[in-house]
Image: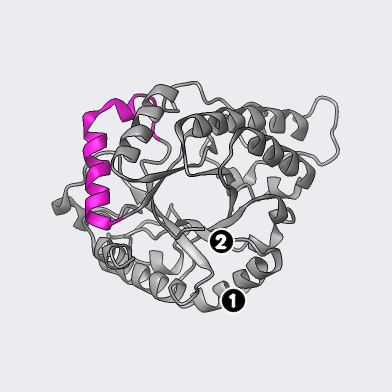
Amino acid sequence: METIFGVTFAPFAHRGTFRNPSVQESLRKMKERTGATHIILVPCGLQKTPQSENIDFTGEGTVSDEELSELIVYAQSLGLRVILKPTVNCENGVWRAHINFFDNEVPGEPKWSNWFASHERFQLHYAELAEKIGCTMFITGCEMVMAQRREMEWRNLIGKVKSVFSGPVSYNTDKYQEENVTWWDCVDVISSSGYYPFGSWKEQLARIRKVVEHYKKPFFFAETGCMSVHGSGGTPNDWSLAGPADPEEQGCWYREMFRETLRCPWIRGWGLWDWPAYPCADEKAVTDGSYQFCGKPAEAAVREVYRAK
């Protein structure tokens, strides 16, 4: 497997976003300024609450197939390889990891069987699009912590994805969950979200390596990043953290993350979170506390690693 020098681009974009000409400008600048070889695109499926059974990917909260396809073709024209990762979110703001139902179905209660049927339609729709348009990899879901225990349903889904998508298939588990997925044998690539705090990377990478060695699969961080908020380096997974903007702390976190992961040849890349849909104004970066790293010290850390490939 080639090393993925990747960036997650404009995640969870709403319908019409990719029609704006500025989006192509932002993508072109991302490639020029970072040296990325891959982008990860994240079309969003929405369910109302963690206990809703239906996932909608046809409404205003999701980019249309036409605009998504046009952006993929443009990215490919720039020499970027495209990874597609359709991801579920809850409209009420609860994190997707908490999507959950009774293990034994109860009449009148929401059911895993109905949810997985909807999730299958969502995933297969984009797997077919990914195959048609020549995506490099397909990631069939992200950070579904409570749902991961439903092994047979995931095996069935991944089998169906592989029947329509001919490239490598992965699943993006959450931080600290790498050893809790019991069905890694049925994917081609293991991936996870690398939001680990300052000072913990050696310990966490040693733990993840055991999983990778057991299953003998390639591994990469399909997500990794840190907000530029003071204190985020200690809890980089906490997107709700409030405080003053601190781009220097974000930059320090990126440098530590790269320093430790580059020591591990079994790690085959990164999907950094994230780069915005519209070109960022560098003069505003100093006050921006988001995960975006454009125009901040973290961008220089990324460029140093990605251009050295």
Residue 22: give x, y in percent of width and height: 21, 34
Residue 163: give x, y in percent of width and height: 66, 34
Residue 259: give x, y in percent of width and height: 39, 75
Residue 73: give x, y in percent of width and height: 35, 33
Label 1 neighbour load within 10 Å: few <14, some 14-19, many 20+: few
Q: Nearer the viewer, residue 121 or 105?
A: 121
Residue 219: assigned label: 2
Give the image's coloring scheme. Answer: one colour
- The image quadrant of residue 210 is bottom right
Q: Nearer the viewer, mark 2 or mark 1?
A: 2
Whether 280 is among the magenta residues is no
Q: Which residue type carries mark 1? A: Ala
At 32% from the left and 72% from the top, the residue drawn is: 252
- The image quadrant of residue 75 is top left
Q: Nearer the viewer, residue 147 or 265?
A: 265
Q: Which residue type carries mark 2? A: Phe
Q: Which residues are magenta?
A: 13-35
Disc 1: which residue: 206
Classified by dominant secondary structure, the portion drawn in magenta counts as helix
Q: Is residue 246 visible?
A: no
